[in-house]
Image (cartoon, rainbow, N blue to C red):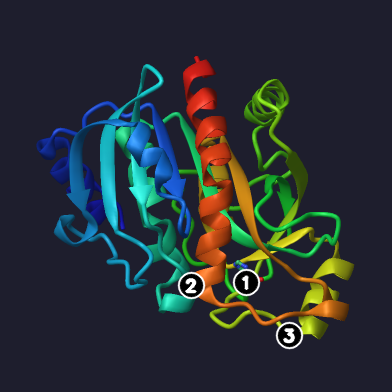
Amino acid sequence: MQTQLNETVSYLNQQGITAPEIGIILGTGLGGLVKEIDVQLEVPYDTIPHFPVSTVESHHGKLIYGQLGGKTVLVMQGRFHYYEGYSMQQITYPVRVMKLLGVKRLLISNAAGAVNTNFKKSSLMLITDHINLYPDNPLIGKNLDEFGPRFPDMSDAYDRDMNNKLREIAKTNNITLHEGVYAPVQGPNLETAAEYRMIGKLGADAVGMSTVPEVIVANHMELPCCAISVLTDECDPDNLAPVELAEILEAAAVAEPQLTLLYKELVTQLA
Ligand code: HPA
């Protein structure tokens, strides 16, 4: 993997991606932050050596390099999901690349279902912790000692400093920012009522199909990260209504301007 990573990094360096400070991974239907970026370079995933290629229609699949809030950012527009058939190592490959390129912090977003029935559709939830419900883990196999330890600590998986800043920014701008535990499932089907009930009982507030692999690998490399879920559907097991992708995208679009504001302001405030 190290040889491949070096090839990917030197290709991106050659393209002009030389000094990103902050990495951002944008979830389903959440590309709006890109409009705020003074774009210097766009690199489609399928042109990058050893990069997986996104297969989901709602994901554009490119790296965007540019200026946001006075910082140099590297944005993944479109991420890789387990349900697409990628391995956990493929899903998290771009996070390793970001770290090697020099990224100091990672900001993540996703679309998720609200298991906590107090949380409404199209509101935002700051992820303060997670329960990994994937049957897999990106760190399985020989440990990459040059990146981090065999048994990485996860007691502080989501960076306190960035979370505090996000709370403040939300308050200042009158944005409702719920907080809670995120649980990812492998998908691609949404959950049955019984599954939502179980996930809630386990202690999760939101359920999705992403983010945790990237967070695990970021923690392995001591790359501080934060993550926000846009809640796109209400998963009340006693009143479960059918959900379609179009509705999820619509709900994401409603909340997106708030997410964009939070992340743009966070980037601006970061040292
Ligand atoms: N379950 C899993 N993933 C999701 C959901 C959901 O209800 N909504 C958006 N992503």
Q: Quadrant of ligand 1?
A: bottom right
- Write the residue at 84% across / 67% down: 200
Judging by the rendered image, the residue that carries numbered circle 3 is 192
Judging by the rendered image, the residue that carries numbered circle 2 is 82
Local SS, label 3: loop
Local SS, label 1: loop
Q: CA distance from mark 3 to mark 1?
A: 17 Å
Which amino acid type corresponds to the residue marked 1 in the rendered image?
Tyr
Residue 128 spot, x, y in % from top left: 73, 43
Dot in front, 3 or 1: 3
Which amino acid type corresponds to the residue marked 2 in the rendered image?
Tyr
- Write the residue at 22% across / 43% down: 9
Q: Is residue 55 visible?
A: yes
- Write the residue at 73% across / 25% down: 171
Residue 26 spot, x, y in % from top left: 44, 49
Of residue 243 and residue 209, the one placed in the foreground of this image is: 243
Position of 22 compared to 7: left or right?
Answer: right
Position of 118 compared to 101: left or right?
Answer: right
Residue 194 spot, x, y in % from top left: 82, 84
Label disc, if present, on residue 134 of the rendered structure: 1
Q: Is residue 139 visible?
A: no
**271 versus 19 height, above or below:** above
Q: Quadrant of residue 155?
A: top right
Q: CA distance from mark 2 to mark 3?
A: 19 Å
Quadrant that contains the N terminus: bottom left
Mark with earlier residue (2, 1): 2
Dot in front, 2 or 3: 3
Which amino acid type corresponds to the residue marked 3 in the rendered image?
Thr
2 and 1 marks in contact (CB < 8 Å): yes
